[in-house]
Amino acid sequence: MTPEDFERLQALMASRTGFALSSSRMQLAEHRLGPIARREGFHNVEALLNSLWARPVGSLGWSVIETLLNTETWFRRDRHVFDLYARELLPVLAQARQGHPVRIWVAGGGSGQEAFSLAMAALEQGLKVDILSTDLSRRSLDKAARAIYSGFEIQRGLSARAMLRYFEPVEDQWQARPVLRQLVQFERANLLSPLPHDLAAKGPFDLVFCRYVLEDMLPDARDKALEHLRAPLADEGCLFLGADEKIDSKIFRQVAGRAGLFVKGLDRNKRAA
């Protein structure tokens, strides 16, 4: 891969997803594109990119983009966040909902571990939740919909008790049981655009989880994404970012002493009025 090819990849990622592809990831990008080139019938990465530049709009472009996305996630990532959600927020919200499900949106939910972690916490307490998990990566969404994970993925965050209670063996892997899967809906969405109407209609959401997603975005794209996270969130609804993520925003205010937790404020139009 030439430096010129990588610069064009950086521009493609920025325009389609808002994500910044740092120069330090050039070798990683070439390594990840190798399997895509072979799958699509190209002799090498250079041939793949030549075809992409000739026709940048199409399924090949999205295949390349999705391969370069950071989709790493695991069950109950940042345990203190899930403790806060399960012990403090979820019971209060469930009581306020008066028998209706607490509505949750996981934005950039990857292959489903975060959404299923939230669902497990609700099942542990006998509380109702309705969870929407969205992502850009079709491959991650396919995996999430199948809800099948390796032993390593299961053990990365889950106890043996949770594994046996909520997952069942499928050959040498583990699949989420129906009682867990029925609580989560997986759909494709891009944070650079408003949440599609049919998905936004599942709100307003009481909680939005968008952890370790915005930190890889360019500043303008991050601002746009925050607007799209705010819109379907209920008044005084909560946004969870990564534990160390900071945002400079007038539409969310950080909760003191709660790393990564923000509350929705007034939108700009209401402030101007």
Image (cartoon, rainbow, N blue to C red):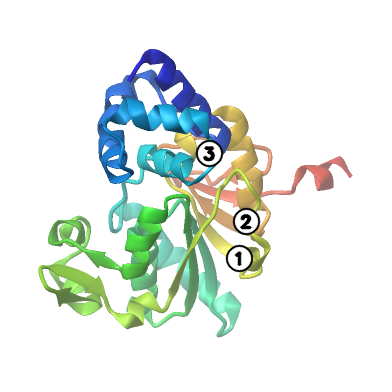
Mark 3 Cα-neighbour bin, 10 Å: few <14, some 14–19, many ≥20:
many
Left or right side of 121 for 190: right
The x and y percentages for residue 69 are 39, 40
Q: Which quadrant, please, contains the N terminus? A: top left
- 3 or 2: tag closer to the N-terminus: 3
Please, what secondary structure does the residue beneath circle 3 have?
helix
Farthest residue, direction bottom: 99
Would you place residue 253 above or below residue 55 in this image?
Answer: below
- Tell me the residue that label 3 is attached to: 17
Camera-side residue of 19 and 105: 19
Please, what secondary structure does the residue beneath circle 1 have?
helix
Give the number of the mark in front: 3 or 2: 3
Residue 153, quarter of picture: bottom left
- Tell me the residue that label 1 is attached to: 199
Left or right side of 138 for 273: right
Farthest residue, direction left: 172
Are the two marked residues, 2 and 1, in contact with CB atoms closer than 8 angstroms?
Answer: yes
- 3 or 1: tag closer to the N-terminus: 3
Q: Amino acid at mark 3?
A: Thr
Farthest residue, direction top: 3
Q: Amino acid at mark 2?
A: Leu
- Tell me the residue that label 2 is attached to: 195
